[in-house]
Image (tube, rainbow, N blue to C red):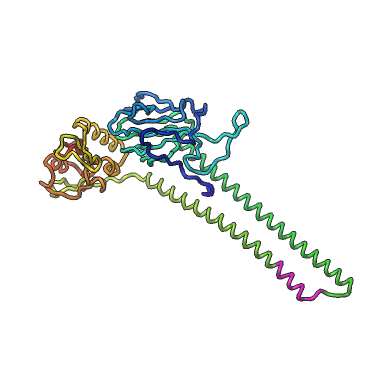
Amino acid sequence: MSSKGRRPPRQLKKPEKVFEKPHWVLPPPPEFAKAHLEVYKEEGVILKRIYLGKKSCNLFGRDQRMCDEVLNHPSISRFHVVFMHCAKIEAGGIPSKPTKNSFGEDVEDQGIVVADLHSSHFSLLNGKRLPKGVAVLVFDNDVLVFGGSTRFYKVKGIGMTRQQRKLETQRETQKEKEREAMEALAAQQAHQEALASRVAAREASSNAHEKKDSGTGKKRPREDRDRDRDKDRQRDRDRDRDRDRGRGRDRGRDRADERDNKKSDKNEKDEAEPVKKKRKAPSGHEQGFVRAKHILVKHKDVRNPKSWLEPEGVTRTKEEAVELVQGYLQQIKSLKVGFSDLAKTVSHCSSAKRGGDLGKFGPKKMQKPFEDAAFALDVNEISEPVFTMSGVHIIKRTQ
C-alpha cells in the first residue's frame, strides 16, 4: 500500500505526579463491552478477569490512589501501562474511511491500544518489548507481561486476532493496488481518446484551411504550416512527458512495496528455520577457562549497595532480590525475553551495557560461589540463583 497519507503512532510523555487522559481518547463503544484481560499465574489457571470496556482509560501500576488496576510486584513502576479506547489510526497507519452507525452518522473505526508509560523496567507484547510511550493496538490472544512479574495477561473480547488483522490489511492492500491499476488504465484510455480527438481536430482544421485557400485560389505559406505542425508536436510531447512522470512515481511506490514484502518474507523464513543442535563442548575445567554472561540483582546487605540502576542505594531485602531473580529466570526459560536484552535493563553490574558479558576468565578470578557455578555449566546452560557478596546472580555460560 502506498505510504502517502500514512500517520505515525501517538506518543505519550512520562507522567510526573498524575496521569492526564489524552485528548484523542474516545468513550468505549458497545461492541467492546466484553473486552477484558485474563490474568494467569500459569497456563490454564485464570486468576481473574480485568474488563476494559467500562472506562475509556484503564491505568495499571503501583499507585493505589491513581491506578485502576494495582500491581504489587517490586519491578512495577508507579504508572506502568495504560489501555485506551481510540480510533485505530491513532496507533499509526493510513486513515480508513469512516463507517455509518445506526443513526447514519460517520464513526471512526475504533480499537484498544496499550502504551508503556516509560516504566523503569519493561513491558512485553507477544514476547517483544513495547516501545516506551507509543500507542500499540491489541487484539484477541495477545499476551502481555509487565516488569519482572511472572503473571501474564491474555487479551480477549476484541473480536479480531492479530492474524486476522494481517489478512484484512493484505486484502485492503490488494484492493488499493487494483484501484490504482484501474485508475492508471482509465487515465491511459482518456489520454488516447484526447489524442485521437486532437488528431481529428487538426485534420478538420487542415481541411478547412485547404477549402478556404482553394476558394480564394491561394495556398497557405509553407512556413505557417510547418510552425503549426511543430507547435502541435511539442504539445503532444509535453503531455507524454507529464504522463510518464506520473507512471514513474507509481513504479517507485510499487518497488518500495515489493522491497518491504521481500524483507517481511525473509524475516518470517528466518524465524521458521529450526535451531540446529550443536555438539557438546568441553567442560570449563577441561579447557581451563569459561566465558559467561550474568544478571546481578543487589540487596541492602551486599558489600556495595549502589549501582548504575540505583545510584542512591539499594533498599530491597535479600528475599525481594531472590523473588526478582526467580521472575527473570522464568521469563528467560519461557523464551519471553532474551538473556542479553534482559541483562541490559535489569542487571546491577556494569557489564549490563554489554548484555551481561564478562568475557573469558579462569580459576580464582571470580568469587568462589560464582566460579564454581560457572565452571559447572555446559555451554548455553543457565544456572539457578547464585549468592555472592555482590548479590544474587543468574549465570549463562557462552564458551
- Image position, residue 126 (x, y; %): 38, 37
For the residue pair 73 and 362, the one nearer the viewer reads as 73
In the foreground, 89 or 78: 78
Please indicate whether residue 291 sits to the left or right of residue 207 in the image.
Answer: left
Counting from the top left corner in percent of width and height, residue 204 is at 80, 64
Instruction: Judge left or right: residue 22 versus residue 342.
Output: right
Q: What is the number of callouts on the image?
A: 0
Q: Majority secondary structure of the magenta segment? A: helix
Q: Residue at x 53, y 56 (%)?
A: 252
Of residues 43 and 309, which is closer to you in this image?
309
Residue name at image x 57 percent, y 44 percent: 175
Give how far across and how far down residue 274 sits, in percent: 34, 44
Q: Examine the rendering and report whether any part of residue 126 can be seen.
A: no
Residue 262 visible in rendering: yes
In depth, the one of 20 and 151 nearer the eye is 20
Q: Which residues are magenta?
A: 220-232
